[in-house]
Image (cartoon, rainbow, N blue to C red):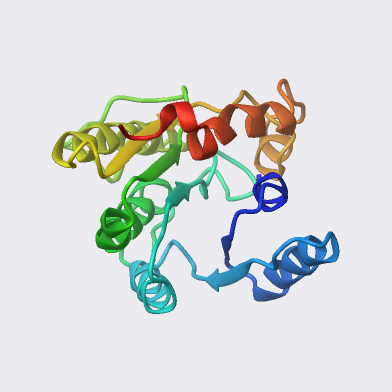
Amino acid sequence: MAERLAADGADLILHGRNQAKLDRIADQLAAREVSRPRTVTADLADLDQVRRMAAEIRASLDRLDVLVNNAGIGGGQPDGRTRRTSADGHELRFAVNYLAGFLLTLELLPLLRASAPARIVNVASIGQHPLDFENLMLERDYDGLRAYGQSKLAQITSGFELAAHLPADEVTVNSLHPATYMPTKIVLAEIGCSIDTLEERVTATRPLVTDPALAVR
């Protein structure tokens, strides 16, 4: 996705946990004679780091046209099948897949609204599970796939709620299931095979980022 958007002439900000990996990707894009992306680092399992990253972005930009919330943890390997908690004590998959992106969105929302028309794109999943508010952190009967599914449902429902509160001429909010079992590290480590391609994922997601037909009117 970064390669396609850079080729389109977009000025990108790439997020990751590892600065060396980010630098490698940014250098590869710059070698293709496109603008070298800016990079920001944060561990999404730590909400203080999310706040710091958002502050860094706000301080360095005067506009933000699109926010794509894509990072996440799958239902099993390589992140494990047992219950783990974030730096803030939340169930890890709920924290990374939902809380971090929700917080980042709220922290950047004033900048997005000031850049109207702007877009928020949540890369979600068709794999969802009902939210049990009596056991939201899954301290009982933990299952990684259930944890993943409820984090994705929370992500999608929060998108609907946010869209309902934003002026239609300022920011659009969309969530999508980009593809099924792509050959990513998460899928290959847990499932061992893939169904859809990364190309299909990019093809599905890119219009929500760039298609003029989906612009706010």
Where is residue 18, by image quadrant? bottom right
* Nearer-the-camera pick, 18 or 201: 201
Q: Check the image and report above or below for 53 versus 133.
A: below
Where is residue 28, by image quadrant? bottom right
| Quarter of the image that includes the C terminus | top left
Position of residue 115 measured from the top left corner of the image (x, y, whole percent): 33, 56
The residue sitting at the right extreme is 31
* Left or right of 160, for residue 146: right
| Quarter of the image that includes the N terminus | top right
**Which residue sits at x=77%, y=68%?**
24
**Which residue sits at x=38%, y=52%?**
101
* Nearer-the-camera pick, 114 or 85: 114
Where is residue 13, by image quadrant? bottom right
Q: Check the image and report above or below for 61 versus 208.
A: below
* Left or right of 11, for residue 170: left
The residue sitting at the front extreme is 217
Position of residue 176 measured from the top left corner of the image (x, y, whole percent): 46, 28
Q: Check the image and report above or below for 128 versus 188.
A: above
Position of residue 188 measured from the top left corner of the image (x, y, whole percent): 74, 36
Q: Check the image and report above or below for 10 versus 163.
A: below
Position of residue 126 measured from the top left corner of the image (x, y, whole percent): 46, 22
